[in-house]
Image (spheres, helix red, strand yellow):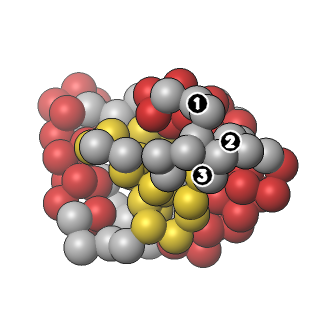
Amino acid sequence: MTTLDLTGKQKRHLRSLGHGLRPLVQVGKHGLVPTVVQQTRECLAAHELIKVKVLEGCALERDDCAAELARATQAVIAQTLGRTILLYRPHPESPTIELPQGRAAAAHSEER
């Protein structure tokens, strides 16, 4: 799976959708153990957009934790705010979240 690059407009859209969400995954003092990564994968498959809470006892820094978790789950970081990470990964077969198109994508679709 290739990494997904989000435009600023798409990130803003995801942040607005994620505003009311509650964290589904917590990263504790043991860090990114395989069960946390697996739980994150399952939540992303079910919801596409999830919040992850990095607890104060976590040995990893928030930004390091976000980057590693995104890499391990092939997700994109839509936002990090405090100790909360907003991750996005579209469902491979039937995505439910429709992202706004960027200018380049809109211009390309008009040419067709």
Give the labeled residue for mark 1.
60
Q: CA distance from mark 1 to mark 3?
A: 9 Å
- Amino acid beneath label 3: Val
Residue type (three-letter) at the residue carrying disc 1: Leu
In the image, taking residue 73 as reference, residue 12 lies left or right, namely left
Quadrant in which the N terminus appears: top right
- The image position of residue 29, as x and y in percent, is 65, 46
Measuring 51% from the left and 36% from the top, which residue is drawn there? 66
Mark 1, secondary structure of its residue:
loop
The residue at 60%/52% (across/down) is 27
Q: Are marks 1 and 3 in contact (CB under 8 Å)?
A: yes
> Which labelled disc corresponds to residue 31?
2
Q: Secondary structure at mark 3?
A: strand
**The image quarter in which residue 35 lies:** bottom right
Q: Position of residue 11 (x, y in %)?
A: 26, 43
Q: Quadrant of residue 7?
A: top left
Please, what secondary structure does the residue beneath circle 2 have? loop
Q: Nearer the viewer, residue 104 or 65?
A: 65
For marks 2 and 1, the one nearer the N-term is: 2
- Please determine whether, in this image, residue 11 is positioned above or below residue 16: above
In this view, the residue in front, 98 or 25, is 25
Residue 27, which numbered label? 3
Does the residue at mark 3 contact the one at mark 2 (Cβ under 8 Å)? Answer: yes
Report the label total: 3
Q: Are marks 2 and 1 in contact (CB under 8 Å)?
A: yes
